[in-house]
């Protein structure tokens, strides 16, 4: 395969692979909207970092791993075209990575609905959740490298793929996708991400379904 064809796809989970933010839904369902809103307001006011926001929204959650997984399975809807994009990447031998600031215990539950062949092709890089009667603790993926703002900087994943010789397409929708987008060769953005990228001067393509992404990826 020629270098120009060595593409990899990095896709956010909450609000990108899925039609809604399942992490927020988990926090609201099991800890209440008031606690979730209080943490979001502190973040919006600049009082806490994004990493601290993630820890804060999940800390009051006292549900079990099984309860969280069952809720995610019932609530999550994969965005139109997601499975087609994964299948295309599998056929072409292109790595497909779900890279998320969310937690393994609900992301893995949702990805289980993929066929075994497609699930086997999806690599997952995300934070880990440790449920207990005292709350849901977040263990951040990686060694804290990267921007220092996100807890798990997705830019480190893109940088690793680039170093391995891949051109990288990133699909995302929010703050935690900025570092990945800044290092990617091709960016597909929705939600709040276009506003960040406009301010940073990073080119991107808007999308609402993964059919649009699939049509725009180089052959």
Image (cartoon, rainbow, N blue to C red):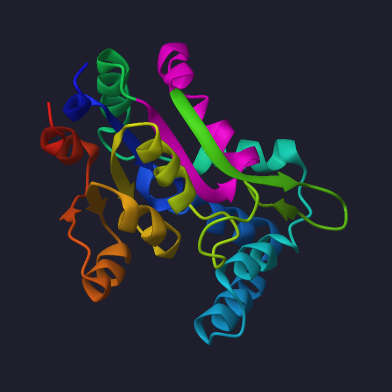
> At 63% from the left edge and 59% from the top edge, which residue is drawn?
27
Towards the viewer: 75 or 169: 169
Q: Give the range drawn in magenta.
A: 95-121
The percent position of residue 97, horizontal first and vertical second, equals 42, 34
* Image quadrant assignment for residue 121: top left
> At 25% from the left edge and 65% from the top edge, which residue is drawn?
194
Is residue 114 in view from this perspective?
no
186 vs 193, left or right, is: left
> At 44% from the left edge and 26% from the top edge, which residue is drawn?
122
Q: Reply yes or no: does residue 98 show up in magenta.
A: yes
Say which quadrant the C terminus sits in.
top left
Q: Count up the numbered dots.
A: 0
Say which quadrant the N terminus sits in.
top left
The percent position of residue 118, horizontal first and vertical second, equals 40, 18
Q: Reply yes or no: does residue 114 show up in magenta.
A: yes
The percent position of residue 158, horizontal first and vertical second, equals 40, 44
Residue found at the very far right of the displayed protein: 133
* Image quadrant assignment for residue 34: bottom right
Q: Is 4 rendered above or below residue 120? A: below
* Image quadrant assignment for residue 72: top right
Q: Is 58 rendered above or below residue 49? A: above
Is residue 54 in view from this perspective?
yes
């Amino acid at each position: 395969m020629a270098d120009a064809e060595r593409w990899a796809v990095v896709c956010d989970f909450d609000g990108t692979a899925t039609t809604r933010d399942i992490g927020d839904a988990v926090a609201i369902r099991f800890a209440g909207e008031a606690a979730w809103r209080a943490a979001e307001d502190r973040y919006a006011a600049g009082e806490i970092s994004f990493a601290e926001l993630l820890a804060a929204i999940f800390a009051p959650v006292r549900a079990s791993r099984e309860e969280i997984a069952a809720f995610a399975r019932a609530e999550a809807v994969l965005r139109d075209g997601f499975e087609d994009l994964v299948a295309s990447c599998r056929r072409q031998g292109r790595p497909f990575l779900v890279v998320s600031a969310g937690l393994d215990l609900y992301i893995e539950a949702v990805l289980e609905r993929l066929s075994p062949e497609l699930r086997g092709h999806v690599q997952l890089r995300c934070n880990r959740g440790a449920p207990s009667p005292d709350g849901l603790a977040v263990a951040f993926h990686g060694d804290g490298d990267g921007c220092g703002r996100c807890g798990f900087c997705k830019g480190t994943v893109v940088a690793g793929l680039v170093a391995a010789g891949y051109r990288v397409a990133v699909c995302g929708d929010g703050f935690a996708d900025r570092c990945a987008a800044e290092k990617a060769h091709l960016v597909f953005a929705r939600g709040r991400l276009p506003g960040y990228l406009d301010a940073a001067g990073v080119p991107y393509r808007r999308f609402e379904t993964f059919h649009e992404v699939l049509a725009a990826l180089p052959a």
